[in-house]
Image: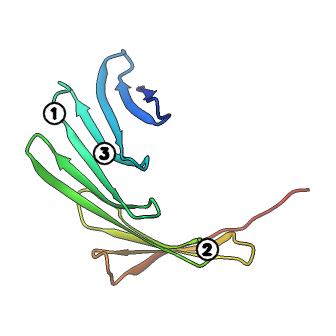
Amino acid sequence: METWKREYGSNGKLSKESGYYSDGTLYMMRLFAYDTNGHNSSIEILEKPFTTGNQLLYTYNSRGDVLTETYFDRLRDIVFSVNEYGYTYDSNNRLIEFIKNTSFDKVEYTKCVNTYDEEGRMIKQDMYRSNKFDGPYEQVAVINFTYTYSR
């Protein structure tokens, strides 16, 4: 069994995670950095000997949604992958469509299309897959949501 220790900075945000094996040996650290808007701008992933690790770098749109996640191999000084994200909102500020790359090691995108009822509750999510951000997409699942209220 492993355990994780989390540390928070003066900004109240996660600054460091440390992973330990069951014997208490440290095996991984993740260091978090934030931009001036408070968004997570990078995560540095360090494994033994904790010198140079890999890094995740993020870009955001004006709403604060992640647009890209770049996985940078600092040891070899190369970009391993770039994951793209896309968002569409309706006039009520509800997320209607979300696209994300679902894998670091291959190009596969998932698109979720959300349907809401008149009270603003999500009632259905259609899921699609494609090997291109712009499609075409093939439907792979439909999730229907129901709500039960007890009195």
Disc 2 packing (10 Å; few <14; some 14–19; many ≥20): some
User: Residues under labels 2 and 1: Cα distance?
Assistant: 44 Å
Point 31% across, 30% down: residue? 29
On the image, numbered disc 1 is attached to which residue? 52
CA gap between label 3 and label 1 equals 15 Å
The Cα–Cα distance between marks 2 and 3, rounded to whole angstroms, is 33 Å
In x, y percent, where is residue 86?
39, 70
Q: Residue at x 11, y 51 (%)?
A: 78
Camera-side mark, 2 or 1: 1
- Disc 2, SS: strand
Residue denoted by label 3: 42
- From the viewer's perspective, tell me whether residue 31 is left or right of residue 4: left
Direction front: furthest residue: 36
Label pair 3/1, CB-CB below 8 angstroms: no
- SS of the residue under disc 1: loop
Helix, strand or loop status at disc 3: strand
Q: Are marks 2 and 1 in contact (CB under 8 Å)?
A: no
Residue projecting furthest to the right: 151
- In the image, residue 19 sits, relative to residue 86, either above or below, namely above
- Residue 82: x and y in percent read 24, 60
Image: 81 above or below 134: above
Q: Quadrant of residue 51?
A: top left
Q: Quadrant of residue 20?
A: top left
At 37% from the left and 81% from the top, the residue drawn is 137
- Work out whether 43 lies above or below 122: above
Label 1 is placed on what type of residue?
Answer: Thr
The x and y percentages for residue 8 are 45, 29
Q: Earlier in the sequence, mark 2 or mark 1?
A: 1
Residue to which mark 2 is pinned: 124
The kind of residue tagged 2 is Lys
Q: Nearer the viewer, mark 2 or mark 3?
A: 3
